[in-house]
Amino acid sequence: MRATAALLCHAFLLQLAAYVVRPTSAYRAIELGVDPRMVGLIAASFALLPLVVALSIGRWNDRGNVTRSLVIGGVLMTGAGLGVHLWSRSLTSLLVWNAVIGLGHLLAIVGQQTLVARLGRERLDSAFGTYTFVGSLGQAAAPLVLAVVGGSAVLPDTGLLFAIYTTTCAGLLAVTFLLPSPGNPDPPPAQGDSLRSALRVPPATRRTMTGALLLSMLVLAAVDLIQVYLPALGVEREISSATVGVLLSVRAAATMASRLGLARLTTRLGRPRLSFVSTLVAGVAVAALAAPLPVWVVGVLLAIAGFALGIGQPLSMTIVTTAAPAGTTSTWLALRLSGNRVGQSLVPAVLSVFTAGIGTGGVFLVTGIGLLATAAMARVLITDDP
């Protein structure tokens, strides 16, 4: 029980730190005079470096380096927090420090998910649902920090927010040493221990994995775009940062609610149908945010979107973990995270290029359409429960 509590505490602090620093970096970029329509570059920088090394980190974890991954991740996030707080005086330096934070976050989260997969094998839907629920709790707390610090100001005190982020990362690093041992790694697959052999699976499994990876990638990209572009939309529509913080918390709270009931929803609908329905509902709700609506309607739409978007991540973790051959769980989870980073890198960067033509509201419309396409792909690819 104590070991599980430490793991959940670690998950909470990791998401709290990540979701404090993401909008804070967007606000710092605006302070530096960056066009609000270009803040998607901040999201891209967070994901770019991890994209290159995710699979290598996954194989490294499969070989028994889970604890090292967690420690190094905490060190990088804490050190980069000091760096971004003290030396982010240009867009270039802000992008560099965000890249380091993204790498540390990847190391920590691959380690976390490997622990959950190994410790919760008998009840994966419940284990990943609880794990992602606690992570969502951190996501919900982060905008409240933003609201308290920002108050009624359109631009909050980013120096104070970066200091809070760094302190949170220091706590994360301390909790790392209380985490349970991951135990002995699973034996490598029969065909060998190389990365290529680890990724060699039967066609039916490959199809299921592809569907889960696409689902995870585009759902997380949508969450990221809400996280980054809602502050920009608030500035554009003269919504206070405190109100934006509350709206982000509404989205995160709804995500938490869906993850608490994930095992029940999966039992009732099955993983394939649940992945389709949840993504379809999210697409409609996110697309509607493009309209000039009252703040309370925006809150309702974010609650609906948050509930639906909250299902995709833990569901994809369960599908990947169940389908992965023995000795390759971390590798496939890392591939899932690598796909997430593709979405986090490319989608915001592409939207940054076209935002001048479609406006900030148009970002939400395009994101909603992308989610509808994702729902259709999930319907075709994820056809059977593994």
Image (cartoon, rainbow, N blue to C red):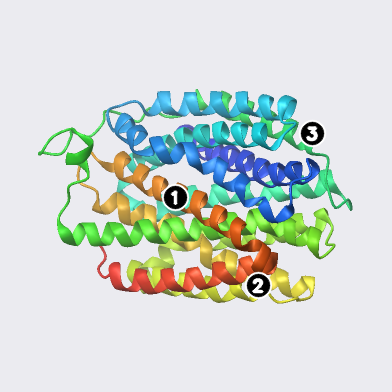
Instruction: Determine whether the residue tagged by mark 1 lies in a helix, strand or loop.
Output: helix
Rounded to the nearest angstrom, the CA distance separating label 2 from label 3 is 31 Å
Q: In the picture shown, does residue 376 fall above or below 238?
A: below
Where is mark 1, residue-wise? 342
Rounded to the nearest angstrom, the CA distance separating label 3 from label 1 is 29 Å
Where is mark 2, residue-wise? 301
Instruction: Determine whether the residue tagged by mark 3 lies in a helix, strand or loop.
Output: helix
Kind of residue at badge 2: Leu
Between 168 and 27, the one lying in front of the other is 27
Between 6 and 272, the one lying in front of the other is 272
Between 164 and 26, the one lying in front of the other is 26
In terms of sequence position, does the residue under pointer 2 or pointer 1 come before the other?
Answer: 2
Where is mark 3, residue-wise? 159
Tell me which corner region of the image, top left, top right, bottom left or bottom right, holds residue 305: bottom right
Which residue is at a point 66% across and 72% down the rendered structure image?
289
Which residue is at a point 77% across and 72% down the rendered structure image?
296
Left or right: 298 in relation to 116: right
Q: In the picture shown, does residue 375 fall above or below 101?
A: below
Left or right: 107 in relation to 162: left
Residue 282, image x and y in percent? 53, 70
Which residue is at a point 65% across and 34% down the rendered structure image?
92
Instruction: Determine whether the residue tagged by mark 2 lies in a helix, strand or loop.
Output: helix
Which residue is at a point 26% across and 31% down the rendered structure image?
185
